[in-house]
Amino acid sequence: MIISCPDCKTRYRIKDVAPGRSDTRLLCPNYKFHFTLIAPQNEGQPPIIHACAKVLVVDDAHFFREMLVDLLMPLNLNMSLAATAAEAREQLRQQPYDLIVLDLNLPDMNGLELIAEIRANNQLNKTRILAMSGVYRREADGMGAIRAGADSFLTKSFRPEELRDKVKKLLL
């Protein structure tokens, strides 16, 4: 059976997927794009290819980026990482994302400024943004992020299910 990556359209030959088998998560080696192959319900039907939502995590703390990836893994997301606003800008130029999880305290730029820059860009302004901060914790700080253009705000002292719920709502 031949399938195509839903992102880059590269074609791959795989073994037939039998009905009733569990879903299989695949990784396109060309673009590191994850997608799920859903097994057919009946004999003779092709499997369904489901593309995962693309999420860009922007945080200068390596540990926190990795923790977010681990916490969001059950949601079957296609995750990319950036440590600075400059890295985030470069990745946003290369491909579109469905959601950006953005730390407001970056070493090279204030996260509020990056949000405003994203919202001013016609190609990116529909991208959902979840702003996060460990420094700004008051309700007024969260409202500042919303006023800047973020779709939601979460302090870094969150419960894992709270993060997953916000991400799910933003991706609906």
Image (spheres, grey):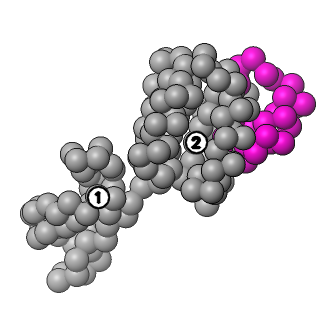
| Secondary structure category for the residue under label 1 | loop
Q: Residue at x 73, y 32 (%)?
A: 112
Q: CA distance from mark 1 to mark 2?
A: 21 Å
Extent of the magenta region: 128-154
Quarter of image, res 104: top right
- Residue 20 as seen in the image, left or right of residue 134: left
- How many C-alpha atoms fall within 10 Å of the one at disc 2: few (<14), some, or many (≥20)? many
Of callouts 1 and 2, which one flags the residue occurring earlier in the amino acid sequence? 1
Specify the amino acid type for callout 1: Cys
Q: Image point 25% across, 63% down: which residue?
A: 9
Is 26 drawn above or below residue 88 in the view shown? below
Left or right of 65 in this view: 15: left
Residue matched to label 1? 8
63 vs 47: above or below: above
Q: Quick one: 112 or 152, which is closer to the camera?
A: 112
Residue marked by disc 2:
100
